[in-house]
């Protein structure tokens, strides 16, 4: 039996997991599908003839912490079971050409953990579904989303067919040199970046405290504080809240999240460093290690300040002026900055006629 586990913020990895399961069932092979955000890992039992599939988005050139924790706690293989890993990435489409995202260590780490647990890794493949990272760019246009989905459904089904035929598909390893090159960035994102992003979300006055974001958050990272959502550290920036808010009230506070570190950096370089005794004051002649340590210290300091100010900001948003400034300096509040959602009917049983991807979810 195939045990297909997935994590998904906005539906891409979920669609991939469903396509795989449908391919298995088309060959009269049994398969079940489990949202790993909703299952206690210790309750999972793997039988000796089970095959295991993992599908998850890529976050910061790695799998998100929720997927990594799941993998680390995953049961050992009872019988060298076959396993495969699919990471959905930030695909985009310009002038009809589909461009891929970047995996970083996502595939490598997951495959390594599964190998250590005694699995035989027979499949490793990135799937370049539409990018959902709308803190950084507007959501893709509907026609591009549909075109990318059709393409990826075909790719995923081919991958499934190969595995069902008893073959291997380790396409992810083609990207190995580039993935290793960007590996240090994945560490930076894991240690600092993800916390910074979690403190970049705010709700505008359009928020009516309906609680949909709190209820739908897969990591239970949101709390309603003083009638407004507050993003805690548990937030993994999966983008579900922002993309699904019925009032389109959730924004990325670019002005705040970029302005605070920029201001702090100016204060450090113009006021603090010149006032330090020469022995600890940074200079151009610093070695790599000293420079790295200083950068790590600055990043940690900026994060601490950002976190403290985020609490203040949350209170301040009750004041009309503060709310206006924060929202006016957010790019996501502009009408042209589309939200992203995977097409709802992408999750259909594929037939011999081809993909079932048409139209967008709500
Ligand atoms: C916080 C965040 C970080 C991301 N980092 C990467 C990345 O490093 N590489 C990449 O190719 N895509 C990246 N993406 C894009 C998503 O991995 C991609 O859109 C994925 O298909 C979303 O899957 P989902 O809908 O199942 O959540 C990132 C998205 C977010 C929100």
Image: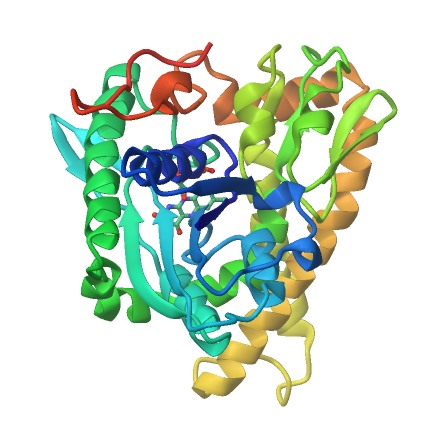
In this rendering, the answer to whether 138 lies above or below 249 is below
Location of ligand 1 given as a quarter of the image: top left
Q: In this orientation, which residue lies closer to the viewer: 119 or 149?
A: 119
In this rendering, the answer to whether 164 lies above or below 8 is below
Q: Residue 138: x, y in percent?
A: 39, 25
Residue drawn at the location 66% of the way across and 27% of the way down: 216
Q: Residue 254: x, y in percent?
A: 54, 34
Q: Answer with left or right where residue 172 lies relative to residue 70.
A: left
Q: Residue 54: x, y in percent?
A: 44, 52
Q: Answer with left or right where residue 244 lies relative to residue 307.
A: left
Residue drawn at the location 39% of the way across and 61% of the way down: 83
Q: Residue 11: x, y in percent?
A: 46, 30
In this rendering, the answer to whether 160 lies above or below 170 is above
Q: In this orientation, which residue lies closer to the viewer: 256 or 78?
A: 78
In this rendering, the answer to whether 172 lies above or below 87 is below
Residue closest to the far left:
96
Tell me, yes or no, if residue 181 can be seen here.
Answer: yes
Q: Answer with left or right where residue 226 lies relative to residue 63.
A: right
Residue drawn at the location 59% of the way across and 32% of the way down: 253
């Amino acid at each position: 039996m195939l045990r297909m586990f997935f994590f998904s913020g906005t539906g891409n990895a979920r669609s991939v997991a469903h396509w795989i399961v449908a391919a298995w069932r088309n060959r009269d092979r049994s398969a079940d599908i489990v949202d790993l955000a909703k299952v206690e890992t210790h309750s999972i039992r793997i039988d000796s003839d089970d095959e295991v599939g993992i599908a998850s988005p890529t976050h910061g050139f790695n799998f998100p912490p929720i997927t990594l924790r799941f993998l680390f706690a995953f049961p050992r293989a009872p019988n060298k079971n076959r396993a495969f890993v699919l990471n959905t990435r930030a695909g985009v489409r310009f002038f009809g050409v589909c461009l891929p995202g970047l995996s970083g260590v996502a595939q490598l780490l997951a495959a390594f953990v599964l190998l250590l647990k005694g699995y035989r890794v027979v499949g490793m493949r990135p799937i370049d579904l539409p990018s959902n990272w709308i803190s950084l760019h507007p959501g893709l246009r509907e026609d591009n989303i549909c075109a990318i989905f059709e393409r990826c459904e075909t790719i995923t089904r081919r991958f499934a067919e190969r595995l069902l035929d008893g073959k291997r598909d380790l396409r992810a390893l083609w990207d190995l040199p580039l993935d290793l090159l960007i590996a240090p960035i994945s560490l930076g994102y894991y240690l600092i970046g993800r916390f910074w992003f979690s403190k970049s979300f705010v709700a505008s006055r359009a928020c009516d405290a309906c609680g949909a974001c709190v209820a739908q958050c897969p990591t239970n990272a949101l709390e309603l504080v003083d009638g407004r959502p507050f993003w805690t550290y548990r937030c993994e920036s999966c983008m579900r809240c922002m993309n699904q808010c019925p009032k389109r009230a959730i924004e990325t506070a670019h002005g705040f999240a970029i302005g605070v570190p920029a201001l702090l950096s100016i204060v450090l370089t113009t006021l603090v460093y010149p006032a330090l005794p020469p022995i600890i004051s940074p200079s151009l002649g610093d070695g790599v290690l000293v420079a790295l340590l200083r950068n790590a210290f600055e990043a940690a300091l900026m994060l601490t300040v950002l976190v403290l100010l985020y609490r203040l900001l949350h209170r301040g948003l009750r004041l009309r002026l503060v709310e206006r400034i924060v929202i006016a300096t957010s790019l996501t509040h502009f009408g042209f900055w589309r939200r992203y959602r995977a097409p709802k009917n992408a999750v259909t049983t594929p037939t011999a006629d081809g993909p079932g991807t048409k139209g967008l979810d709500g």
